[in-house]
Structures are given as structure tokens and as C-alpha cells.
Amino acid sequence: MEDFAAGRPLSCHASSLEIQQAATRAGAGIAALPDSMAGSDTELVPVLRETPLLSRDIWLVVHRDLKRSGSVRVVVWAIQGA
């Protein structure tokens, strides 16, 4: 975020994404929020839609005893389809 701010002051440091989202919604400025969280928030406006600020891989580890569980398979399918 400091690189993106390019010397402009940061007014709020929060370790929780929910707090960052609430502060942004209240008008505190901009926040780096995941699309899965901010994309459905109608009170927020994306500023970098075409160029992500940062990107992370998501890994799901499943114990071999659970990999055939229906609910686990649904979660795996949902993550792979995202």
C-alpha cells in the first residue's frame, strides 16, 4: 500500500479487512480489498479494476480421509472454478 500511495500519507492502519472495508465505506479513503469482498459492496467504487494492486495464490489442503467428502468436494470445486 505504501508503494501505491507514492509518498502520500496513510491515515489508517488496520490489520482486519473488515475494518478496512468499513473505514473505506465511511469515507476514510481507499483500501486494498480482495475482489471477493469488495466486488459485491455497492457502496465502494473500484479504482484499479484492470490492474490488480496485488495478487496471491490460494491453496487448499485436504486430508486424504476427507477428500471424498461431499462438502469438501463442493468447496474444492468452487475454488477451482473461481
Image (cartoon, rainbow, N blue to C red):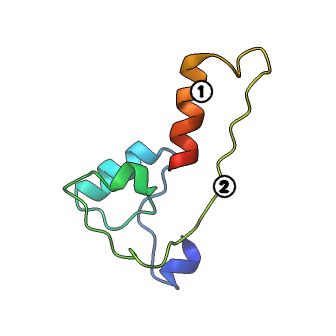
Residue at label 2? 57
Q: Quadrant of residue 12?
A: bottom left
Q: Among all residues in the image, which is located at the extreme bottom?
A: 6
Q: Secondary structure at mark 1?
A: helix
Measured Cα–Cα span from mark 1 to mark 2: 19 Å
The residue located at (40%, 43%) in the rendering is 18
Q: Is 23 situated above or below 50?
A: above
Q: Quadrant of residue 9?
A: bottom left
From the viewer's side, name the closer residue of 60 and 24.
60
Label 2 neighbourhood size at 10 Å, few (<14), some (14-19), many (20+)? few
- Vertical relation: 20 (above or below) 7: above
Q: Residues within 10 Å of mark 1 (few under 14, many from 20)?
A: some
Q: CB of mark 1 within 8 Å of CB of mark 2?
A: no
Type of amino acid at the residue the image marks with label 1:
Arg
Residue 73's disc is: 1
Looking at numbered disc 2 in the image, what kind of residue is underneath it? Asp
The residue lying toward the viewer, choosing from 76 and 39, is 76
Q: Is residue 59 left or right of residue 6?
A: right
